[in-house]
């Protein structure tokens, strides 16, 4: 599994559980085996896969899931990314060392969740302070980077996700902190790249693009040519992988066209197409977020048990959101249903599609 020049389409795959909320390795293997061919780069133990909960509670179980991912990556000839963020530096470092020993393409490392991590709280009084970011770089990210052996092919990717602090973009690592870690890694023979950039403030990604010219990101907003992105990691890929894979590759092609000639007719036509796609994908994403049960709905679409002892929601509680999806993301309904045809939520979505819902009025009833 060697590095690839373009990241492409990555999906943080779900980790399946049994009815008791325990990891089900057999069902997980079966689901991952079906998903690996549909993505460019599978991401396991990411946030959608509840990786940090697994890693924080049971390192051996996290390693066992890495073993499954490595086996399937070799079977399907895919580069593999493993989520290695944790609430302690020891757990993040230990899993990163294990992953790098398997020559995996990359680890995707998020910061500790400040509210849940005594280690993080010991660094500074606020996760939004400059002092906290400097200490976090020295006490957490740097040791994890150095857990990758010198000269290894395994890359270190950041997961820049401010809701892991206090839902404030200021909680994301500042560009100058990223550049300092990049320089440190280069001097010691390790590879760092930009990683997953999940910031809704449109100005923040541009700030990273301007101030971190040597980093490539897997960005959420792909149509802006000023962003230095080489792909995307999208949790929605668990239910609409084919649509999103095509969308990401069209965005990558659009970026090339707009960098060469932003005024060309081909560039303008593709931009219109990409923006239409993004509007509908955003409608689906916003629906899942607003439901308050993002992960549970993803699992329910897949026909899988609710994850990790999360408060259960009944079909009657989840089903009304299908009318919102049918109304606001109609062209995505076919792929959801065809991808997961036997799950009750997919069947409900198909029923609504057949009934011909054409507006978002049902949203008010949810």
Image (spheres, rainbow, N blue to C red):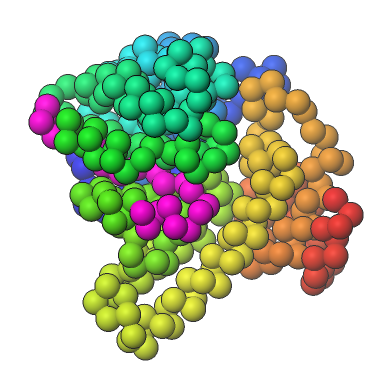
Q: Residue at x 57, y 38 (%)?
A: 167
Residue 85 shown left or right of residue 165 in the figure: left
Q: Residue furthest right?
A: 365
Residue 202, given in percent of the width and then of the height, sits at 48, 58
The vertical placement of 158 against 211, above or below, is above
Q: Residue at x 74, y 45 (%)?
A: 291
Name which quarter of the figure residue 190 lies in: top left
Residue 174 shown left or right of residue 308 in the figure: left
Residue 54 shown left or right of residue 143 in the figure: right
User: Along the line of sight, which residue is nearer the eye, 365 or 215?
Assistant: 215
Please give the count of numbered marks on the rendered protein: 0
User: Along the line of sight, which residue is nearer the eye, 118 or 342?
Assistant: 118
From this viewpoint, is residue 85 visible?
no
Name which quarter of the figure residue 222 lies in: bottom left
Residue 133, given in percent of the width and then of the height, sits at 38, 29
User: Along the line of sight, which residue is nearer the eye, 227 or 266?
Assistant: 227
The vertical placement of 48 against 353, above or below, is above
Q: Residue at x 48, y 48 (%)?
A: 199
Q: Residue at x 44, y 57 (%)?
A: 203
Question: Residue 190 lies in magenta, yes or no?
Answer: yes
The vertical placement of 256 against 8, above or below, is below
User: Along the line of sight, which residue is nearer the eye, 105 or 132?
Assistant: 132
Residue 298 shown left or right of residue 235 in the figure: right
Residue 36, given in percent of the width and then of the height, sits at 42, 43
Boundaries of the magenta span:
186-207
Residue 30, given in percent of the width and then of the height, sits at 51, 33
Question: Residue 159 lies in magenta, yes or no?
Answer: no
């Amino acid at each position: 599994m060697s590095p690839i020049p373009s990241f492409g389409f990555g999906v943080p795959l779900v980790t399946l559980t049994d009815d008791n909320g325990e990891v089900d390795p057999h069902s997980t293997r079966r689901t991952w085996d079906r998903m690996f061919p549909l993505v460019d780069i599978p991401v396991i133990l990411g946030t959608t896969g509840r990786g940090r909960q697994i890693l924080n509670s049971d390192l051996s179980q996290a390693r066992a899931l890495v073993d499954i991912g490595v086996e399937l990556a070799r079977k399907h000839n895919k580069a593999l990314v493993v989520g290695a963020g944790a609430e302690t530096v020891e757990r993040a470092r230990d899993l990163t060392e294990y992953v790098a020993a398997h020559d995996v393409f990359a680890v995707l490392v998020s910061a500790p969740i400040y509210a849940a991590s005594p280690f993080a709280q010991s660094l500074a009084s606020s996760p939004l302070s400059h002092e906290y970011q400097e200490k976090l770089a020295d006490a957490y990210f740097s040791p994890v980077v150095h857990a990758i052996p010198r000269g290894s092919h395994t890359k270190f990717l950041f997961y820049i996700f401010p809701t892991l602090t206090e839902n404030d973009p200021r909680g994301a690592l500042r560009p100058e902190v990223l550049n300092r870690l990049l320089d440190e890694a280069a001097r010691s023979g390790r590879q760092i790249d930009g990683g997953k950039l999940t910031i809704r403030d449109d100005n923040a990604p541009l700030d990273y693009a301007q101030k971190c010219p040597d980093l490539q990101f897997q960005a959420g907003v792909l149509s802006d040519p000023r962003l230095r992105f080489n792909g995307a990691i999208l949790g929605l890929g668990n239910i609409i992988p084919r649509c999103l894979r095509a969308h990401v590759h069209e965005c990558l092609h659009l970026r090339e066209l707009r960098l060469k000639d932003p005024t060309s007719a081909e560039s303008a036509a593709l931009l219109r197409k990409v923006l239409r796609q993004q509007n509908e994908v955003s409608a689906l994403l916003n629906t899942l977020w607003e439901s308050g049960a993002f992960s549970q709905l993803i699992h329910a679409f897949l026909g899988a048990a609710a994850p990790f002892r999360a408060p259960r929601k009944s079909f009657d509680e989840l089903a009304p959101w299908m009318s919102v999806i049918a109304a606001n993301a109609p062209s995505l309904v076919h792929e959801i249903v065809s991808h997961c045809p036997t799950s009750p939520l997919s069947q409900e979505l198909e029923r609504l599609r057949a009934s011909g819902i054409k507006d978002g009025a049902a949203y008010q009833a949810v």
